[in-house]
Image: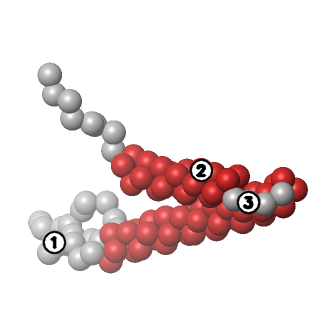
Amino acid sequence: MNDVDTRSGSGALGAVVGFLGGALVGTVLTLLVAPRSGTETRRRIAHKAASSRDALARVGSAAKQATAAAQAAFTTALHEESAPDGWETGASPSPRSSAR
């Protein structure tokens, strides 16, 4: 049997999510073992959680903007692509002039 992973596009997203999850776990563990009072540690964890939420919101917004820009660029390039001689660009496949 072939053990090839057939999921498309999940590798990069999985790597980013894994990296962010590992960074979050490492940050929380570092704060928990640091020699500080419980109140100070909880305050620092709450601050880090809030800044992480803000960063993730910015990443999500940037990803949406990048996707929209890429779609627009692709559509523009597709419509600007020159068609073979005798064919209209962006129209149904009919010759520019009909041969009689």
> x, y (%) of residue 76?
40, 74
Q: Amino acid at mark 1?
A: Pro
Labels 1, 3: front one:
3
At mark 2, the secondary structure is: helix
Q: Counting residues from the N terminus, which is met first, the one under dot 1 or under dot 2? A: 2
**Residue at horizontal 87 percent and vertical 56 percent from the top:** 39
At mark 1, the secondary structure is: loop
**Residue placed under numbered mark 1 in the picture:** 84
Assign the C terminus to one quadrant of the image: bottom left
> Which residue is at the front of the view, 75 or 94?
75
Q: Which mark is residue 35?
A: 3
Q: Residues within 10 Å of mark 1 (few under 14, many from 20)?
A: few
At mark 3, the secondary structure is: loop
Q: Is residue 30 left or right of residue 37?
A: left
Q: Residues within 10 Å of mark 2 (few under 14, many from 20)?
A: few
**Residue placed under numbered mark 2 in the picture:** 25
**Residue at horizontal 65 percent and vertical 66 percent from the top:** 55
Q: Residues within 10 Å of mark 3 (few under 14, many from 20)?
A: few
Q: Let me know if residue 35 appears in the view.
A: yes
Q: Is residue 66 left or right of residue 41?
A: left
